[in-house]
Amino acid sequence: MEHQDLTTHKNGRQRKLAGTNVARDMDRGETSSSEPEVEEEAEGLIRGSDSEDRRHRVRPGVRGELGNILLLLFLYVLQGIPLGLAGSIPLILQGKSVSYKDQAFFSFVFWPFSLKLLWAPLVDALYFSKFGRRKSWLVPTQYLLGLFMLYLSMTVNSMLQSEGGPKIVTLTGVFFMLAFLAATQDIAVDGWALTMLSRENVGYASTCNSVGQTAGYFLGNVLFLALESADFCNKYLRVEPKDTGIVTLSDFLFFWGVVFLISTTLVAIMKRENDHGRGKRRVQQEETQGVMETYKLLFSIVKMPTVFTFCSLLLTAKMGFSAADAVTGLKLVEAGVPKEQLALLAVPMVPLQILLPVIISKYTAGPRPLDVFYKAFPFRLLIGLEYALLVWWTPSVKQEGGFPVYYYAIVLLSYALHQVALYSMYVACMAFHAKVSDPLIGGTYMTLLNTVTNLGGNWPSTVALWMVDPLTSKECQGAVGQSCGSPAEAGLCIKEGGACVTTLDGYYVESVVCVVIGLAWWVWLGKKIRRLQEQSPAAWRCRVDQ
């Protein structure tokens, strides 16, 4: 319920980083004292103004740029496809009884979107002028995405169904590359949106972003899991039942691999970027030099006492939620809840996810937005305990035909309450980031804080998955002198006619430990994060020698 949805939120859909603004903001902050360059820059501004005036005359309003808006929307949809597919793999692996250590290893797939700040300045500054600043990265990145998908379509079945179990290392490596390429494509598309749309319509870029990524994730996760499920297809879409779903993972990967290759070819040939005018080499050289300046600026921001304290708190704040966010959904699948049903629960949540930021922003718009974060914190911890009770209750509710409707209603209500607490903390954090970010370097500052926020959710989730197996106790029943301490011992127990029975599930241990850690953080460090709001604006300003 949580893992496949929340992980993607953290790494793509909601908590998107403005990575492409980093080097661009640095470029805007740099000036030159040489008169020829100033004159050429002035000429460029005049040419840009003239071209913009012509664009406004020829294509006024949204209708005039409908083609560009639709192209942006389509590119963001493509970006959401590999994210959705990556989110569906843990549920598929859980159905094959892989260990939670394997799930933890695969969770590294969701890290690239949280780390893209590390290479965003390079994407912003290095390019082939003749081909286009954004197309230089977009086209090869999307070609590689398409080729990886075609490769996976031919090999994914052997990776998932090998004799020794799924090949976790290979799967992780391939899907990590998909996520890395999607994150790089995101940087390029974000930057292109600012020049593809006119100034009056550039606000639609964020709409294309959220709608497109959400739609792509829905196609790659919810729709795929539904159409891949034989039970779902036989129940709702077929007259005569069959043993497989309408589509397989291989079919889905092959289809979208072809879509990526064809659409990228069309964009490369038919869509042109704005001409940079004269002095292309000088501009590119200055931007390349600006990459190092951007990295120096990031380091300077982190060294500030207030920022360092805030980042330390952000990196540790979500430890108390890690078991609930990362493990609950997998435990429900392990208890017999169909993975496609869990995925479909995300559909009725969409209106709530749209309304919550609008409602919560009314309470975070004041001078103390982190008060909302502080107040929502214990409620989210309690929801984590409620999730543990839900997992414990699930096996007793299961019937021969599946689970009753009231069970899914309770799961949906639990999920909705979790979303309220999650969004309250998220919107409060984003509001505080906007409040304290130095306006002179706002893009870099905001991106850094968002990156730290995302990392603060990723590493506890990976650790939580990793610790489930070591905290779980099992004993061999039916075979004297045997144990179930390792996979080899468990296999020997079964061979001797016994069965490994779980006496203590590590998930429940983790749930309690996480809540205790979370409460300790809230009591001792929660007040510290509230006191950061009392710091003067000067304490958040970065002083860098120009």
Image (cartoon, helix red, strand yellow):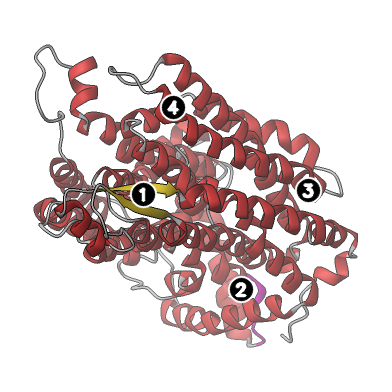
Whole-percent x and y of residue 96? 23, 47
For residue 431, side relative to residue 457 (left or right): right
Point out residue 255 in the picture as x, y percentages from the top left corner.
16, 42
Q: Which mark is residue 404?
A: none
Mark 2 belongs to which amino acid? Answer: Met
Specify the segment rendered in magenta.
Answer: 26-33
Does 227 sit above or below residue 432? above
Query: In the rendered view of the protein, which quadrant contains the N terminus?
Result: top left
* Secondary element type, mark 1: helix
Seen at 43% across and 38% down, the residue is 214
Q: Which mark is residue 26?
A: 2
Q: Which mark is residue 347?
A: 4
Residue 31 located within the stretch drawn in magenta: yes
Residue 83's tag is: 1
The amino acid type of the residue labelled 1 equals Leu
Q: CA distance from mark 3 to mark 2?
A: 34 Å
Residue plotted at (48% across, 78% down): 283
Name the N-terminal-most of marks 4 and 3: 4
> Which mark is first along the chain, 3 or 1?
1
Near mark 2 (Cα within 10 A), the count class, few <14, some 14-19 or many ≥20, is many
Q: Which comes before the other along the chain, label 4 or label 1?
A: 1
Residue 215 spot, x, y in % from top left: 39, 36
